[in-house]
Image (cartoon, rainbow, N blue to C red):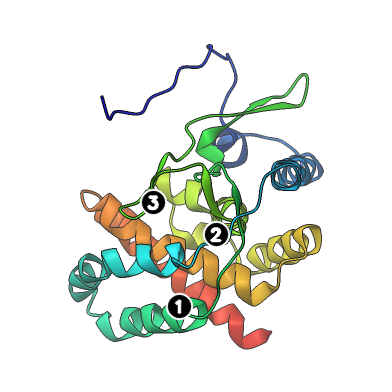
Amino acid sequence: FGIASYQIEYFNMPSLSDVFVKGDHKRSIKLKIIKNLIKTIDFIQNNSLKKINKNNFIIDKLESRETEILNFSKELSDKFEITRLINKNKLFFENKNFVETIMHGDYCFSNILYDRRTESLKLIDPRGYLNKTEGYSFYGPYVYDYFKLGHSFIGGYDNIISGKSADSISIQEIKENLIFFTNETSLPKDLLIHGMVNLFLTMVPLHKNNSFRQKNFFKISLILDSLLWEL
């Protein structure tokens, strides 16, 4: 009682994390995959009931992990910069109340399977528990799945998880992916960038046993933040 779970059939398909990090697909194929993933989000949201929620899930998550984030930032001798990022992120999102729709909640490459032969996609491992206030819910801010997909495609989250540095993605590639993504979603660039920074910062406490990942989550957060000066 009180435990949520789900079961799915077995799919003999690699995750998009493997496809994008280790695969040999042409960029045109990768962009087609991203387009299809964006269309999937659009389809789910267009066929979902809409809700208004006064709770700010995005800020609440950051604030609930802020102490742990700052504790680790001391080890980097970079507490000032991280504090600046946190405050800047909270200021950006504090007066934004996003419409809520059905969402996957963890829409990153590792939770999406891909069949190269049929070009079909399968979503796995959705987020169930939203927060202490909402408990288990399939609803969340409509922007959240876009942020999650962006932090994989633009921010290179899966590269970092696989052991690569945040520097393994060139600034030029980040910029090109950002332009492509915002053109396909119509999301403002500043909204998407702040959303991705929020995700990378809140990932830090979840990877406390891997300082390499934590350091590179901070590094990519600073790289993404620097792009705001160019908008």
Identify which residue is drawn at 77% across, 40% down: 36
Report the front residue among 49 and 146.
Answer: 49
Amino acid carrying label 2: it is Gly
Q: Residues within 10 Å of mark 2 (few under 14, many from 20)?
A: many
Location of the N terminus by quadrant is top left
Q: Give the SS element for disc 3.
A: loop
Horizontal and vertical percent position of residue 154: 61, 58
Q: CA distance from mark 1 to mark 2?
A: 16 Å
Q: Which mark is residue 155?
A: 2
Q: Give whichever of discs 3 and 2 has the lower sequence position.
A: 3
Q: Give the SS element for disc 1.
A: helix
Report the front residue among 225 and 170.
Answer: 225
Identify which residue is drawn at 38% across, 83% down: 87
3 or 1: mark nearer the eye = 3
The residue singled out by tag 3 in the image is 134
Q: Which mark is residue 101?
A: none
Amino acid carrying label 1: it is Asn
Counting the numbered discs, the total is: 3
Horizontal and vertical percent position of residue 164: 44, 50
Amino acid carrying label 3: it is Glu
Q: Which mark is residue 89?
A: 1
Report the front residue among 121 and 178.
Answer: 121
